[in-house]
Amino acid sequence: MTSPDRAESLEDLLKRLEDALQRLADPGAPLERAVADYEEAGRLLETAQERLEAAASRIAEMMADAGGEG
């Protein structure tokens, strides 16, 4: 498993998360693989949430700046 890269797009992160979740849904997957996928999904989810929060913050700042200019 690779860790999330800051240069990786949000879309790529979400695709990797979706892939990990699909593997987790496989009842025949070995336990070791399931644990690794669970850990990867947690890391990917955390990184995606951080990026979404940062984007929301930037948008709120831009809207506040635009509202003060008029």
Image (cartoon, helix red, strand yellow):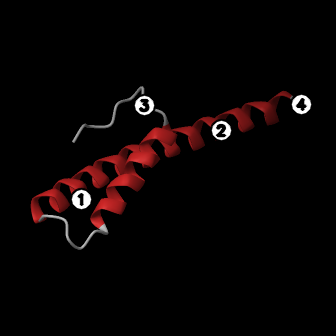
Query: Label 2: few (<14), some or many (≥20) within 10 Å?
Result: few
Does label 1 or label 2 sit earlier along the sequence? 1
**Which amino acid lies under the numbered mark 1 shown in the image of this protein?**
Tyr
Residue under pointer 4: 70
| CA distance for labels 2 and 3 | 20 Å
The single residue placed furthest to the front in the displayed view is 28
Q: Residue at x 26, y 50 (%)?
A: 40
Q: Report the front residue among 67 and 19.
A: 19
Count of all numbered marks drawn on residues in the image: 4
| CA distance for labels 1 and 4 | 49 Å
**Which amino acid lies under the numbered mark 3 shown in the image of this protein?**
Glu
Q: Secondary structure at mark 1?
A: helix
Q: Residue at x 83, y 27 (%)?
A: 69
- Mark toward the viewer: 1 or 2: 1
Query: Label 1: few (<14), some or many (≥20) within 10 Å?
Result: some
- Mark toward the viewer: 2 or 3: 3
Q: Residue at x 24, y 55 (%)?
A: 37
Q: Report the front residue among 9 and 60.
A: 9
Does label 2 or label 3 sit earlier along the sequence? 3
Does label 1 or label 4 sit earlier along the sequence? 1
Residue under pointer 2: 59
Q: Which mark is residue 47?
A: none
Q: Residue at x 32, y 55 (%)?
A: 20
The reply, left or right, for residue 44 in relation to residue 39 is right
Q: Position of residue 36 (x, y in %)?
A: 17, 53
